[in-house]
Image (tube, helix red, strand yellow):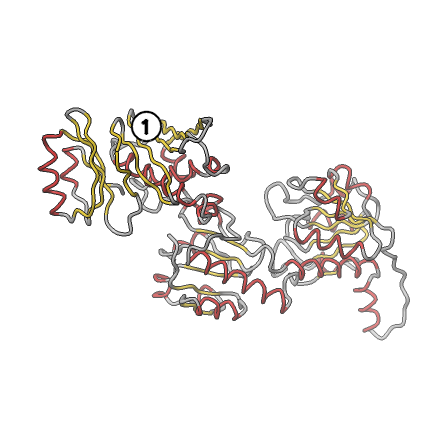
Amino acid sequence: MPGLQHVVLLDKIDLSARDILAQNGIKADVLEKFSEIPAETLQSLDGLIVRSATKVTAEVISKCPGLKIIGRAGTGVDNIDVGEATNRGIIVMNTPGGNTISAAEHTCFMVVALARNAANNNAIMKSHKWSKGAGQELMGKTLGIIGLGRIGLEVASRMQAFGMKTVGFDPIVAPESVAPLNVQWMTLDELWPICDYITVHTPLIPQTKDLVCSKTLALCKKGVKIINVARGGIVSETDLLENLNSGQCGGAGLDVFIDEPVKDWTLVDHPNVVATAHLGASTKEGQLKCGQEIANQFVDFATNASSINGVINSPALIASFSTENAPWLRLATSLAQLLSASTSETLVGDWKVEITGTEYPGNLKRFILTAVAAGVLKKVESNANLINSSGLAEKHGLKLSFAEDLTQGDVQPQLKITAFGKSISGVVMNSKPYLKTINDAVFTELFDLEVSSGRLFAGTLNTSDVASVLTSLQKIGLQRMNLATVGEKSTLVGVSQKSDDSLNKFGIFFAA
């Protein structure tokens, strides 16, 4: 799958991204809106980079038949239909670190602005009135941070310089990991009542939608101040307005909204709201970093780099770029393709995957079934890959199971797949995948499964038919082949330039 030819950059991506792609041999067009992309370009582009303005919907994706990868120059991907992209086998990646400092600094600005009622005091002064309103110090106040990722922790370190106590919650962060950073981890139930300021730094997902609402604000101190520089919808705008009017919420700093651009200005117009137009990442430095980061990630993908960052919809794909995991995943896919080719039309049933021996990657079991599923499904889904195979397996009724036999001693690790009474196995040697057995046939000379061009085939047939089959294979450009004989049966595996379905009657099948 890797390899990129033509990428389109939208939403005023920093031009350094275009330059990085071009320097690495990737054609890059810069446009502002998706609607500006010419029809012929839609057919040829295989990469798309956006910021937050472009909505990469299912309809948009369907207009780009060759699309391989979608990049978000920023953190949030709620403007991308990740589910549709995954179903189509398209990578979605973001740049989680590019705008960290910009978003963190904007959050800190909001906290300070709320503390000193900066928006109102500025408006009063610009109306040529001399009026002194009281604010409050931040020293000794408690800041609650919901979401202890990069941005949340950068906010913590900066606000600690103001003398604030920082507490936080994140379901996937261990308390002991943030304690050295002077952040006290606590549950949400513990956090709500003690905070003077609460800032959210989470993605917008079902679990975080309307996280800050009347129910949770009722648990807070009277006059608590809320900051959202993450995603509109994490804070219920209707409930926030009610609590601002009642005084339960003393102020809000909002950079993001459910509707962008804003349609109903009532909340923004509230005197205790400091509002900006989704500017959290909008700094020259932030946009430069995001543009460069996403472009470099595209280059890493295109050139099969040893690692790839930012992929959000395929852990198996990330693993496939590791020099340790890659040959095992290629082995799993190739073995599954061969076994799938020899099965009946239906793939519904139990597919058992087993690893025996020692000295194979410890995290392999997390990804191996995805690779097997991708290989099996190539027979019926030409776009099956490490991104969409899990969903496709469920769709087609595949039941995949995994087992490992942690054999003691120095035993060469082996991968075996069994289905419909048939089996196939292979090993990895010198970072290359090799086929070892098909059913009871053991190949004394391991067969190299790396195929740069041509069609992989295998099958078991009557030994008396071997000569006739070899003649047919030579006619379609036989490149290499191994043979193992058990009794009156011979098993072949090889590579030919083309396929020939007429050989199916002998028991020879070509991998998809």
Please tell me whether mark 1 sits on a helix, a strand or a loop: strand
Task: Give 433 or 423, whichever is nearer the viewer.
Answer: 433
**Could you tell whether 177 is left or right of 131 in the image?**
left
Relative height, residue 209 to residue 161 (above, below): above
Q: Is residue 250 left or right of residue 444?
A: right
Residue 118, position in %: x, y? Answer: 81, 64
Front residue of 403/93: it is 403
**Neighbourhood count class around disc 1 (C-alpha, 10 Å): few under 14, some 14–19, many 20 upward:** some
Q: Residue at x 17, y 46 (%)?
A: 478
Residue at 16% x, 31% y is: 461
Q: Which residue is mark 1?
A: 419
- Quadrant of the rendered image containing residue 435: top left
Q: Residue furthest front?
A: 410
Amino acid carrying mark 1 in the image: Ala
- Location of the C terminus by quadrant is top left
Instruction: Estimate the x, y position of residue 368 in percent, counting from the top left.
Output: 43, 37
Q: Residue at x 16, y 49 (%)?
A: 477
Q: Residue at x 73, y 53 (%)?
A: 227
Instruction: Decide if residue 159 is on the left or right side of residue 379.
Output: right
* Along the line of sight, the residue nearer the viewer: 333 or 378: 333
- Quarter of image, res 336: top left
- How many labels, in total? 1
Query: Does 186 appear above or below 63?
Result: above
Residue closest to the eye, 336 or 465: 465
Image coordinates of residue 333 in percent, x first then y, are 35, 40
Whether residue 285 is situated above or below residue 505 in the rendered picture: below
Q: Indicate left or right for 3 with 30 as reference.
A: left
Tell which residue pokes out farthest to the bottom in this image.
Answer: 128
